Amino acid sequence: MKAKEIQELIDFISHSGLAEVKIETDEFKLSIKKSADAPAAVRMVETPAQMVTSHNSAPSPQNTPSPSSTSADEVNIRHKEIKSPMIGTFYRSSNPETGPFVSVGDTIQAGQTVGIIEAMKLFNEIDAEISGKIVKVLVENSSPVEFDQPLFLIEVAE
């Protein structure tokens, strides 16, 4: 089962009102359970390799931008988010010996690589869709991320 399919299943279940779903095939077991006050949690076990992937979709406090002195409308006009296109582990650099792709204060161009997300043993480069200046890094290096989770806050180039 692909990461996108799992995310679509989570979204469907979160909107359906179901509290728990279990799917079992020859290749994997998937259990999704939603508590009353938190989004769905996923536990996937791949039977052949005995590989366990555990993922909780509750947002962490560090991933939310802190309030500033400007109004929310002004921030929304001047700032855009670069969001995760998938579930996985976010890395700010291509390997531990090199520096991050981007840092706060860097000016980036659309199409520039800003990070990598590892999903199911595949490394996927994350490219900026807009040009601007990095205002805030919203996710720590080597931390799990959700589909559509904000990774960076960008001040849009004018």
Image (cartoon, helix red, strand yellow):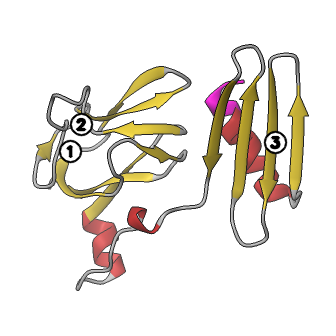
Residue type indicated by callout 3: Ser
- Residue at the spot of label 1: 131
Image position, residue 79 (x, y; %): 28, 63
- Residue at the spot of label 3: 31
Image position, residue 138 (x, y; %): 33, 57
Q: Is residue 156 visible?
A: no
**Residues packed near mark 3 inside 10 Å, few (<14), some (14 to 19) or many (20 plus):** some
Q: Secondary structure at mark 1?
A: loop
Using the numbered discs, state the Cα–Cα distance from disc 3 to disc 2 in whole angstroms.
38 Å
Q: Specify which label sits upstream in the sequence, 3 or 2.
A: 3
Q: Secondary structure at mark 3?
A: strand
Residue type indicated by callout 2: Ala
The span picked out in magenta is 1-5
Disc 2 vs disc 1: Cβ atoms closer than 8 Å? yes
Q: Specify which label sits upstream in the sequence, 2 or 1.
A: 2
- Residue at the spot of label 2: 110
Q: Specify which label sits upstream in the sequence, 3 or 1.
A: 3
Q: Secondary structure at mark 2?
A: loop
